């Protein structure tokens, strides 16, 4: 789908239509709708070694289709958008950070983001990069922005589900020449579109709801900013953190159902959050889609769907473990965004500043009545 599919006001096909068509080549007689995965380490290349396809670490036709698709979802109707697929979300995150930052630069990270960010912070610091951190909520990163080369935003944050005002942060950053990246993992492009909110890069783990079946790892970077993006591409070539063709193809195939999954899982998350609200043993309940959630006001301004993750705490670690053991249709597993609901006691990893009884629950695509009943029954069974 190209800019020609969108009218002058930017209006174009709806999410479902875009999801099922994203990145597909023009129909050609006897060709499949979505070409199969191309397994190639190298391509026939007589003469001058120019692209598009030279060597398998640099380009692959299956990535090309997927990258086009993700670009169409992240920045519909916009020209000049470039997308790069990576082996995982962390590969994409590292590609932006380590390609843009040099010794002596300053970067601002969230202090409540994905739990591998503290490891990234250690590595950046070891390379002579100053790392400042601040919480996601209340746009607190604004307070430590001065002189930074890059601002890293994760909204909603994982696992605390705080939301910051991307437009406000991006405007402040750009006013002083700071690049802005948004980790769009939790929201997906059907939840929010960071480039439209002012970000220079939208980066995400495609391992989660974007692909949604819990069977592959993937990452991507999208930008309209050609110069920094050339460095990200160069970084991918140097490090070689590329997706396999099979993963790329499976991911593209999964995009066709993204709207269906996102709608169902968002509705299920809201149903679970509402059911948890009435429970005396539950504290710290967070879901940006709940009208009384502290994040709701700003989330409603910049998000189109509020995601599938709900977080809350039970009184003790033992209580949380009993609850997880009692669940039948919610798997006790890490990660989130899959069509099968999952939940875990987040403190078991040791990386997040959360209470021992803190649970991160990812609503899947089950029937809402079944999911809510399972959660409520497990709460009853795990009571003291
Ligand atoms: C917000 C966020 N960003 C990035 C990642 C890393 O993604 P991956 O596991 O695909 O490397 C995760 C993984 O959970 C995440 O939650």
Image (cartoon, rainbow, N blue to C red):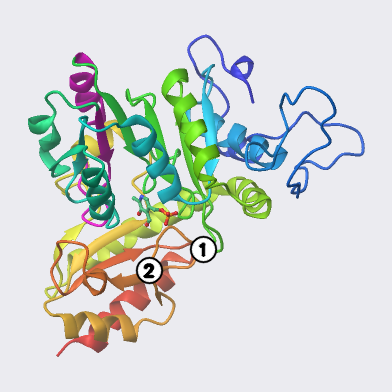
Q: Residue at x 26, y 29 (%)?
A: 150
Q: Is residue 172 magenta?
A: yes
In front: 381, or 151? 151
Q: Does the beta carbon of the residue at mark 2 sit less than 8 Å from ligand 1? A: yes
- Residue that mark 2 sits on: 334
In front: 354, or 115? 115
Q: Is residue 360 magenta?
A: no
Outermost residue, right side = 30
Q: Does the beta carbon of the residue at mark 1 sit less than 8 Å from ligand 1? A: no
What's drawn in magenta, residue-wise? 150-175
For the image shown, how many numbered marks are present on the structure?
Answer: 2
Q: Quadrant of residue 48?
A: top right
Q: Position of residue 359 (x, y in %)?
A: 24, 69
Q: Residue at x 52, y 47 (%)?
A: 241
Q: Position of residue 228 (x, y in %)?
A: 41, 24
- The mark nearer the N terminus, 1 or 2, is 1
In front: 89, or 26? 89
């Amino acid at each position: 789908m190209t800019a020609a599919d969108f009218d002058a006001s930017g209006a174009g096909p709806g999410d479902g239509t875009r999801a099922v068509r994203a990145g597909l080549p023009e129909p050609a007689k006897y060709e499949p709708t979505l070409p199969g995965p191309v397994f190639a380490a190298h391509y026939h290349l007589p003469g001058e070694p120019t692209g598009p396809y030279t060597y398998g670490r640099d380009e692959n036709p299956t990535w090309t289709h997927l990258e086009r698709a993700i670009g169409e979802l992240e920045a519909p109707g916009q020209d000049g958008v470039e997308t790069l697929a990576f082996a995982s979300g962390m590969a994409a995150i590292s590609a932006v950070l380590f390609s843009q930052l040099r010794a002596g630069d300053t970067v601002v990270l969230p202090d409540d983001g994905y739990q591998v960010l503290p490891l990234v912070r250690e590595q950046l610091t070891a390379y002579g990069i100053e790392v400042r951190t601040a919480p996601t909520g209340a746009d607190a990163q604004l307070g430590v922005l001065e002189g930074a080369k890059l601002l890293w935003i994760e909204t909603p944050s994982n696992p605390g589900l705080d939301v910051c005002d991307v437009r406000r942060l991006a405007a402040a950053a750009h006013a002083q020449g700071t690049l802005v990246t948004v980790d769009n993992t939790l929201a997906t492009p059907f939840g929010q579109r960071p480039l439209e909110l002012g970000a220079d890069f939208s980066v995400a783990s495609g391992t989660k709801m974007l692909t949604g079946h819990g069977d592959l790892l993937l990452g991507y970077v999208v930008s309209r900013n050609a110069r920094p993006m050339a460095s990200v591409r160069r970084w991918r070539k140097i490090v070689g953190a590329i997706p396999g063709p099979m993963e790329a193809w499976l991911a593209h195939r999964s995009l066709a159902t993204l709207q269906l999954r996102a709608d169902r899982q968002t509705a299920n998350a809201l149903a679970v959050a509402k059911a948890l609200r009435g429970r005396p043993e539950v504290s710290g309940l967070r879901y940006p889609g709940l009208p009384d959630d502290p994040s709701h006001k700003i989330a409603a301004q910049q998000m189109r769907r509020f995601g599938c993750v709900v977080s809350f705490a039970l009184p003790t670690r033992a209580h949380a473990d009993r609850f997880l053991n009692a669940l039948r249709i919610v798997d006790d597993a890490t990660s989130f965004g899959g069509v099968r609901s999952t939940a875990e006691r987040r403190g078991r990893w040791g990386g997040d500043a959360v209470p021992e009884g803190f649970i991160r629950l990812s609503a899947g695509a089950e029937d809402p009545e079944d999911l809510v009943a399972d959660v409520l029954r497990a709460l009853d069974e795990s009571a003291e």
